[in-house]
């Protein structure tokens, strides 16, 4: 089966990690041949090319520029005619609005891959909803429930992301900790996400403040992630000020954008992402589980479908509740060990790459 995946390509997060995984597994699951059409030549294009994937450029498209839209769709027609694809999969409402109609006019199966709840009133979302796909693929029960509030007649398949378990860390735990000046005795709590408010950075810091008031043991927090938008720059500034104002500078360390997350996770002891808004799925939770990190998450969105009592703790989105869960893990080595042992099996059960990719083939070919 040949699929052309259409994405914007200007940002990098969970969706882009998923697309890179499809490229990485193309030889292991030869039933699926994926090519990629992007509007921006950013990190996603770089990562796909590293995997020797075929990447087509649709040009730097701006929807407010009709000429760029027409040129992108003309390129798409040429790609479809030459490639003889079985389906086009759009990733996000922006790409769906851009190429959905042309795909249908070319009589190619249109799959809309829904990566989050389509509940924004933005004009683009309304435009995308007018172009009905032949199939929805969604990443979680949470996303499916949100989708069915608007469209119920189109076939829908829930398929968890394929997540690669084989990302090897390059540095040893001891070496990584030594480079950051952290002793082996320190319990390290890792967090990795884009600087969007609903990801829970501020809730984690408020929990750290509450934890510090009741627990003077040896722990610290590594916050991983880089800023990609002006709003994220401002948010990071607020977080840094909170850390400084409440005496957390020796406990909370901002590590910036990282290309070595496997190293970070191998050197950490706990993963905590206490979302204040629901995560549609949460690839980072799966990556943490593969690394054997007990996961602390808030009881909402995709986290409910991932974290169970074999691998982590689900709590209410409240600073004291998050602090209490972290206190338990910081001070109970046996609990950490038990949840650590359950993580990899849970991750494989949900997101084994070869099983999930074959599920994709089955869903689109039905």
Image: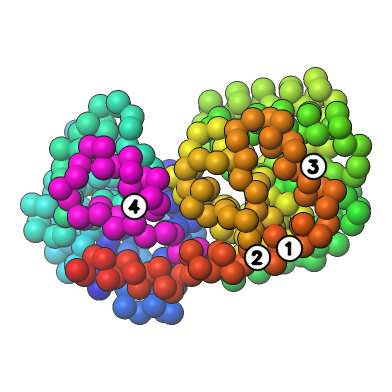
Q: Nearer the viewer, mark 4 or mark 1?
A: 1
Dots 2, 3 in contact, CB < 8 A: no
Mark 1 crowd level (few <14, some 14–19, many ≥20, 10 Å Cα)? some
Q: Is residue 14 visible?
A: no
Q: Marks 2 and 1: in contact by CB < 8 Å?
A: yes
Q: Position of residue 156 (x, y in %)?
A: 25, 54
Q: CA distance from mark 4 to mark 3?
A: 35 Å
- For the view shown, which residue lies furthest in the top direction? 245
The residue that label 2 is drawn on is: 342
Residue 264 covered by magenta stretch = no
Question: What SS does tag 2 mark?
Answer: helix
**Are dots 4 and 3 in contact, CB under 8 Å?**
no
Depth check, mark 2 against mark 4: the one in front is: 2
Using the rendered view, name the quadrant where residue 29 is placed.
bottom left
Q: For numbered disc 3, what is the local secondary structure? A: helix
The magenta span reads 135-163
Q: Is residue 81 above or below residue 111?
A: below
Report which residue position mark 3 lands on: 327
Q: Position of residue 33 (x, y in %)?
A: 31, 72
Q: Residue at x 27, y 71 (%)?
A: 362
Q: Earlier in the sequence, mark 4 or mark 1?
A: 4
Disc 4: which residue: 138
Q: Residue at label 1?
A: 338
Q: Residue at x 57, y 53 (%)?
A: 307
Which quadrant of the rendered structure holds the C terminus? bottom left
Q: Tell me, yes or no, whether the highlighted magenta stretch contains residue 137.
A: yes
Is 327 in front, or is 364? 327
């Amino acid at each position: 089966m040949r699929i052309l995946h259409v994405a914007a390509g200007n940002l990098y997060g969970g969706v882009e990690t998923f697309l890179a995984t499809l490229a990485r597994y193309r030889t292991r699951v030869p039933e699926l041949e994926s090519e990629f059409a992007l509007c921006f030549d950013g990190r996603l294009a770089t990562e796909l090319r590293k995997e020797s994937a075929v990447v087509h450029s649709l040009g730097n498209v701006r929807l407010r520029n009709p000429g760029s839209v027409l040129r992108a769709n003309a390129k798409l027609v040429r790609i479809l005619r030459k490639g003889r694809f079985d389906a086009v999969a759009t990733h996000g409402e922006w790409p769906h609005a851009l190429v959905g109609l042309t795909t249908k006019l070319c009589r190619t199966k249109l799959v809309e891959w829904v990566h989050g709840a389509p509940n924004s009133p933005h004009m683009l979302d309304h435009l995308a909803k007018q172009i009905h796909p032949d199939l929805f693929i969604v990443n979680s029960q949470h996303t499916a429930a949100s989708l069915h509030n608007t469209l119920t007649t189109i076939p829908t398949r829930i398929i968890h992301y394929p997540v690669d378990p084989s990302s090897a860390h390059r540095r040893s735990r001891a070496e990584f900790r030594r480079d950051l000046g952290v002793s082996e005795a320190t319990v390290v709590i890792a967090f990795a996400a884009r600087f969007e408010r609903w990801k829970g950075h501020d809730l984690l810091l408020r929990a750290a403040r509450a934890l510090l008031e009741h627990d003077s043991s040896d722990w610290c927090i590594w916050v991983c992630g880089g800023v990609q938008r002006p709003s994220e720059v401002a948010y990071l500034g607020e977080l840094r000020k909170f850390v400084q104002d409440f005496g957390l500078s020796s406990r909370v360390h901002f590590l910036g954008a990282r290309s070595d997350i496997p190293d970070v996770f191998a050197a950490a002891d706990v993963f905590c992402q206490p979302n204040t808004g629901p995560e549609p799925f949460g690839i980072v939770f799966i990556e943490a589980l593969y690394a054997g990190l007990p996961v602390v998450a808030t009881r909402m969105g995709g986290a409910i479908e991932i974290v169970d009592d074999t691998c982590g703790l689900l709590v209410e989105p409240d600073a004291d509740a998050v602090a209490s869960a972290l206190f338990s893990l910081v001070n109970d080595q046996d609990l950490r060990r038990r949840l650590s042992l359950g993580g990899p099996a849970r991750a494989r059960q949900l997101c084994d790459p070869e099983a999930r990719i074959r599920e994709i083939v089955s869903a689109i070919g039905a």
